[in-house]
């Protein structure tokens, strides 16, 4: 299905599509609700704009008219008195939602702003989301990958009609970096495609090239801890940008999400701007907002400017690594409170062929910040790589957590006491604790209370040592956590 506005905008539209869809506007995509469905693992759907993509925009003239009771826009009417009753019909929740497998690309020439609209219990009003087969049980369980680009126009100055239709030099990048006989690509494995660049379409090669781009950034950050050089990463950036000099393009999620619910990776690319999550939580979102993969899938973020979480979160809950690179800015884990709890609802998984029914627990995650977590038992450990060649990495109040390894490459690391690592850590001050966060198997209140008492005794012993040496005795704060609900699993 194709929906193009060759010279203007696409706005004030709710669209339901049962198959792969290509939507593009020369200027803006604004105040829309798109519910798209990929049916094959090789499907690639597209939403693109030459300027801004704002799924929920409360300030458009058409929304004001649609909410006007005086114009007859209402739920019901008293025909005898010819008067409106009830409330206005608010049909546009402001979603870009992909059902089924494959890939959804959301490409903006300038900014992507998810807006400040409310979340709804039926799963709408969420932002840009991949939900797999939650609305159609005949689809595969695994959901689509999300590829989100801001500040990247098309070659003609309008919308980028796919990665290969953008101003980025994917041809030059793939010719230089995809030279082996076999490609290590998560996308190709999920799509069931051959692991060979020669057998791919140009758009598939571009998707694989983007994966390789983030792999180069990650390895550059790890090597810099020994060499002090980020040349490998900046070389990859220069190759992909080609002659393009990005000057804008920020991503704002506010109280909404970039989220995959049933598998699917999330890729965020802002070569001329930064990423800002929830500077403050507006309204009453159903779950703390952010960039989240709930059921497997990595998160890869590249920006020129800051990555600022505020009160949001960047989490993988059941498998998947996190890689974040900021060329000139800082990476700040934000201020989300540690007592904030997310417990996705238990899912009933129904096999439409065999009629088999299984219960899938949603798992439990606490706090905010940046985290590769294990929301249930048995999740494979994942790594976190945070790279800010010219900036700092700030764990903030929310903290940074990894069930696997943590690698930080930056000019400085702030609030390192809020960093917890299950495996090895590099680039982290030695004062940071190396304790694996067990989100899925939190102990009962009595065990936690005993641990708190033991920790308090250790602090007291240290305090006595400092006093003997003539230092000022520190305060002792004892925190007893009574419990988080649920059993150990």
Image (cartoon, rainbow, N blue to C red):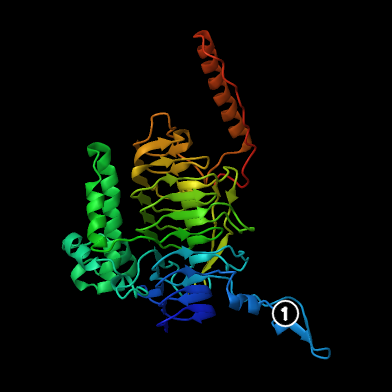
Q: Position of residue 392 (x, y in %)?
A: 39, 41
User: Where is residue 395 drawn, in percent x and y?
Assistant: 46, 40
Residue at 48% x, 81% y is 17
Q: Is residue 282 visible?
A: yes
Q: Is residue 280 left or right of residue 139?
A: right
Between 111 and 96, the residue placed more toward the observer is 111
Asked where in the image residue 209 lies, by quadrant, the reply is bottom left
At x 37%, y 60%, the residue is 269
x, y percent for residue 472: 55, 14
Which of 483 and 163 lies nearest the eye of the viewer? 163
Q: Is residue 281 above or below residue 157?
A: above
Using the rendered image of the protein, determine whether residue 138 is visible from the camera's viewpoint.
Answer: no
Q: Which residue is mark 1?
A: 69
Residue that protrudes farthest toward the right in the picture: 81
Quarter of the N terminus within the rendering: bottom left
Q: Position of residue 243 (x, y in %)?
A: 23, 63
Q: Left or right: 113 with respect to 167?
A: right
Q: Is 7 rendered above or below residue 212? A: below
Residue positioned 80% across, 90% down in the render = 79
């Amino acid at each position: 299905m194709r929906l193009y506005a060759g010279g203007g905008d696409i706005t004030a539209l709710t669209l339901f599509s049962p198959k792969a869809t290509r939507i593009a506007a020369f200027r803006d995509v604004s105040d829309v609700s798109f519910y798209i469905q990929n049916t094959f693992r090789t499907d690639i759907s597209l939403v693109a704009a030459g300027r801004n993509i704002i799924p929920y925009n409360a300030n458009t003239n058409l929304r004001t008219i649609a909410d006007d009771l005086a114009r007859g826009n209402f739920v019901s009417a008293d025909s005898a008195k010819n008067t409106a009753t009830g409330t206005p019909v608010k049909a546009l929740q402001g979603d870009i939602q992909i059902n089924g497998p494959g890939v959804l690309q959301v490409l903006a020439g300038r900014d992507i702003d998810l807006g400040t609209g409310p979340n709804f219990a039926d799963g709408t009003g969420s932002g840009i989301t991949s939900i797999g087969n939650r609305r159609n049980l005949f689809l595969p369980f695994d959901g689509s990958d999300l590829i989100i680009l801001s500040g990247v126009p098309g070659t003609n100055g309008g919308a980028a009609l796919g990665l290969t239709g953008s101003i980025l030099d994917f041809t030059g990048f793939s010719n230089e970096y995809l030279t082996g006989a076999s490609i290590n690509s998560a996308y190709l494995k999920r799509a069931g495609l051959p692991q060979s660049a020669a057998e791919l379409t140009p758009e598939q090669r571009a998707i694989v090239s983007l994966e390789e781009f983030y792999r180069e950034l990650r390895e550059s950050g790890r090597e810099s801890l020994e060499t002090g050089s980020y040349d490998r990463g900046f070389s990859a950036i220069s190759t992909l940008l080609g002659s393009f000099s990005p000057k804008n393009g920020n991503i704002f999620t506010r109280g909404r999400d970039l989220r995959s619910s049933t598998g699917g990776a999330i890729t965020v690319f802002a070569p001329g701007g930064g990423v800002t999550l929830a500077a403050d939580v507006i309204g009453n979102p159903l779950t703390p907002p952010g960039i989240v993969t709930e059921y497997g899938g990595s998160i890869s973020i590249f920006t020129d400017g800051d990555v600022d979480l505020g009160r949001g979160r960047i989490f993988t809950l059941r498998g998947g690594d996190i890689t974040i690179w900021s060329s000139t800015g800082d990476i700040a884990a934000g201020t989300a409170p540690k007592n904030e709890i997310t417990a996705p609802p238990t899912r009933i998984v129904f096999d439409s062929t065999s009629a088999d029914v299984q219960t899938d627990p949603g798992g439990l995650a606490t706090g905010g910040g940046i985290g590769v977590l294990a929301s249930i038992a048995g999740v494979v450990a994942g790594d976190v790589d945070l790279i800010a060649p010219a900036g700092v990495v700030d764990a903030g109040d929310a903290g940074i957590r990894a069930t696997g390894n943590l690698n930080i490459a930056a000019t400085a690391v702030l609030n390192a006491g809020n960093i917890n690592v299950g495996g090895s850590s590099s680039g982290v001050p030695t004062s940071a604790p190396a304790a694996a966060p067990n989100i899925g198997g939190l102990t009962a209140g009595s065990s936690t209370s005993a641990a708190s008492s033991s920790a308090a005794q250790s602090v007291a012993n240290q305090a006595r040592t400092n006093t003997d040496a003539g230092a000022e005795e520190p305060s002792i704060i004892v925190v007893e956590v009574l419990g988080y609900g649920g059993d150990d699993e």
